[in-house]
Amino acid sequence: MAYKCHLCLLELIVLSSLLTGTSGVTETHVFISSGENVRLPCNNALHDCTSTTWLYNRHSAAVELIAGGIIMKQIKRHERLNLGSDCSLNINNISTEDYGSYSCRQYVNGQQGTDARVFLHVLHVSSSTSSSSSQTEISAGLSVTLFCQLYSYPRVSCDDWIRSERIQLFWVNQAGVKLTRSDSRYQISSSSDHCIITQSITLLNEDHNKEWRCEVTQRDQVKASVTYTVKSSDMMTDPAEAEVSRTAGLLFRVMVIIVEFAVFAAPTVILLQIICARRAGRKDSQHPEEIEINTILQ
């Protein structure tokens, strides 16, 4: 009987380690695109979040973001942080600087409880013409390279983590079709650690307003995506839009001609009015006999 009890206890310990990890820390992975808002769950939340502490770690030392339910104002990004009613950590306008490991720590009666760790992975797209924008104006005929990177923690084991968790990065076109290396127009390549995938392409006129989307999947499920849009005034536009533009241009030129005519004609009209007024004044000042003599002489 005692042997069975010991065996049951051992099974409970093993089950607990599987659920919380060997270090007693629960782990969650969150994927988000740069520029969006994210909610990091606190899986050990209490009814009262006044004992909640959120820690951030991407380097060697952990930094307190929230202590005792209060946001630390000395943190550079404190204005983008807020604590949810369920003790979750909300971050607005995510950037590539936000990726890393976050820990939700609760204190019960002054005693530290089990940490709930959240790994935040940020998906970001840039181009060889712009380092931060997901939309840019570039000309037809220009060769451009699009970079899609998954910022993950820890970076040193990105390759192993991607293989173990079946993480994939790939590009899809506007129709949702996955772009492959066999497509002669797109030169698809990835880095050695598979955390970045690029595509190089020479733009055509019909690429105006076209979108390319980078997606990250985990076990064949899409976790996050970023869209890159090409816009350029040099590229062909819709015929209706072009006609409207031409009509507006014609009306503008007509208005310019009218204004120029009014500007140059106005002094001439005023001068004629002055001459006529002077002639009329001279005639009124002459005597009747002078007018008659001048009439005969004329």
Image (tube, helix red, strand yellow):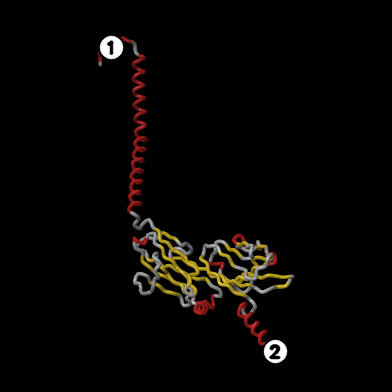
Tell me where residue 237 sits by quadrant.
Answer: bottom left
In percent of width and height, residue 57 lies at 61, 71
Looking at the rendered image, the quarter that the C terminus falls into is top left
x 46%, y 75%: residue: 191
Number of the label disc, if any, that sits on residue 1: 2
As displayed, is residue 15 above or below residue 268? below
Q: Nearer the viewer, residue 297 or 231?
A: 231
Q: Which residue is mark 1?
A: 293
Label 1 CA crowd tier, 10 Å (few <14, some 14–19, many 20+) = few
Labels 2 and 1: the sequence-earlier one = 2
Q: Name the residue at 59% across, 74% down.
A: 27
User: Can residue 269 be seen here?
Assistant: yes
Task: Inspect the image, locate mark 1, and give the three-letter code of the amino acid beneath it.
Answer: Ile
Amino acid type at mark 2: Met
Q: Is residue 63 something that shows in the picture? A: no
User: Tags 2 and 1 in contact by the CB under 8 Å rule?
Assistant: no
Query: Furthest-top residue in view?
Result: 289
Residue appearing at x 28%, y 12% in the figure: 293
